[in-house]
Amino acid sequence: MPSIIAISDTHGKHHGLQVPSGDILIHAGDVSMGGTIEEIAGFLEWFDSLPHKHKIFIAGNHDFLFEQESFLAQEMIPLGVHYLENESIIVEGLNIWGSPITPYFHGMAFNAHRGEAIAEVWEKIPPDVDVLVTHGPPADILDMTFFNGRVGCVDLKEKLKEIKPRYHIFGHIHEDRGTEQVGDTIYINASVLNLRYQLHGEVIQPLEI
């Protein structure tokens, strides 16, 4: 069975990251700090150079180029690297669906207001998804901020009760990095930077699926 390596929130510090080997590498967004062409190009060059057979990523709330100049950003993506924006890809027999959307926060990239607007996005998730990749967490799961506030998406949490993927990979909340199993789903906050935007010592170990 394929192994999955999950990372998120590199924010331009990817060159300092030691990425374990595996079959599928998934990046759950915030590849940059400001979403500039130079930052995105640098990330894509690095991501493409990694030896993993399949390389998949989504954007995050810092990755403005993918929202504001989507055609340009996607034209920059090398062959063999897959970008998901509210869509699926089938890899090694797995249905992987990804979205950059997070609840509205200071007008960052790919924000949607809580409630009806963001629930419409989650309705696009296919019922047979194996690996769900979103930039932000669901409510109450690995979504605790430094200020002891939970900021995950309630509507996403409700959708997950319905679809029950094997894995849900996300980031966004650097300080609540880790894994947690709820029911049949294993949740992974794969942030590689801490609250001060410093690299953690290592990536969460490969997931076997």
Image (cartoon, rainbow, N blue to C red):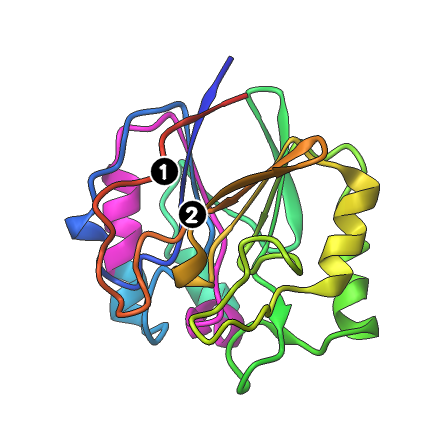
Q: Earlier in the sequence, mark 2 or mark 1?
A: 2
Label 2 sits on residue:
190
Q: Which mark is residue 26?
A: none
Quarter of the view holding residue 121: bottom right
Q: Residue at x 65, y 41 (%)?
A: 88
Distance from disc 2 to disc 1, alpha carbons, whole Å, reads 7 Å
Q: Which of 102/109 is in front?
A: 102
Q: Which residue is drawn at 68% across and 64% down?
A: 153
- In which quadrant will I find the C terminus? top right
Q: Name the secondary structure under disc 1.
A: loop
Q: Can residue 170 be seen in this view?
A: yes
Q: Residue at x 39, y 40 (%)?
A: 79
Q: Residue 204 carries which label?
A: 1
Pinpoint residue 156: horizontal percent, then vertical percent.
Answer: 72, 57
Which kind of residue does numbered mark 2 sit on?
A: Ala
Pinpoint residue 33: horizontal percent, then vertical percent.
Answer: 32, 72
**Residue extending furthest toward the front:** 148
Query: What span is colored magenta in the figure?
Result: 42-69
